[in-house]
Every structure is written in C-alpha cells, then in structure tokens.
C-alpha cells in the first residue's frame, strides 16, 4: 500500500488515521509519502511514523524525551497583571 500525502495521518483522532490503521494489517508492506513531515507538532510526526513503522521511535515518551528537548530563552511570569522577565537563559 502507498499512502501519498501521509502528513494527513498525523492526528490519530481523524477518520483517515483510523481507516489506515484498520486496513494496514491487510497489506504486506506500506509506504507513507510526504514532503511535509512536521505540520503542527512532533506528536503528529510520531503518530505518522509509528503508523507505518510501529515501535521505530519506541513509545511516545521515549521519543519525546530523546528528540523534543525544549530550551527556554526567557522565563516570564505575570505579577499584578503585568508580565515580568524572571530569568534570561544563555
């Protein structure tokens, strides 16, 4: 099976995702083709890859901890309704 525009399968709550997930075991192999692997989030990318290659990145938490490292440049807080810079990270 070949799924073109596979980035449409990033959200696991959509009917498209559910249908492909349902019929995928009926095929010997599957290819997901896309030129836009990350649309909105890394969760969507993980869902799309995991649909075609289950376990490739491990579970979601393993993927998140390994590839989604967030670095904050500034930390802000609101005090008395006004934003205040707490810390600037270099």
Image: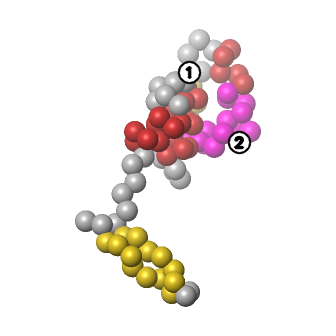
Which residue is located at x 35 percent, y 73 percent? Answer: 87
Q: Nearer the viewer, residue 3 or 46?
A: 46
Residue 35 seen anywhere in this rendered image of the structure: no
User: In terms of secondary structure, what is the magenta stretch mainly?
Assistant: helix
Residue stretch in magenta: 6-21
**Residues packed near mark 1 inside 10 Å, few (<14), some (14 to 19) or many (20 plus):** some
Instruction: Work out whether mark 2 precedes mark 1 in sequence or the reverse, and give the earlier one.
Output: 2
Total numbered labels placed on residues in the image = 2
Is the image coloured rainbow, by chain, by secondary structure, or in one colour? Answer: secondary structure
Residue 53 in the image: state x and y as whole percent: 52, 24
Q: Nearer the viewer, residue 69 or 55?
A: 69
Instruction: Quadrant for residue 74, please give it.
Output: bottom left
Q: Give the labeled residue for mark 2.
A: 13
Residue 29 seen anywhere in this rendered image of the structure: yes
Please identify, in this view, whether the residue under mark 2 or under mark 1 is nearer the observer: 2
CB within 8 Å, label 2 to label 1: no
Q: Residue furthest left?
A: 90
The quarter in which the C terminus is drawn is bottom left
Residue 16 in the image: state x and y as whole percent: 70, 37
Which residue is located at x 51 percent, y 87 percent? Answer: 82
Q: Give the labeled residue for mark 1.
A: 30
């Amino acid at each position: 099976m070949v799924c073109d525009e596979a980035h449409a399968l990033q959200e696991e709550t959509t009917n498209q995702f559910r249908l492909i997930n349902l019929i995928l075991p009926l095929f010997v192999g599957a290819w997901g083709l896309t030129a836009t692997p990350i649309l909105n989030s890394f969760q969507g990318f993980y869902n799309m890859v995991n649909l075609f290659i289950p376990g490739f990145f491990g579970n979601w938490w393993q993927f998140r901890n390994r590839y989604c490292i967030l670095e904050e440049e500034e930390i802000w807080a609101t005090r008395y309704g006004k934003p205040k810079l707490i810390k600037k990270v270099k």
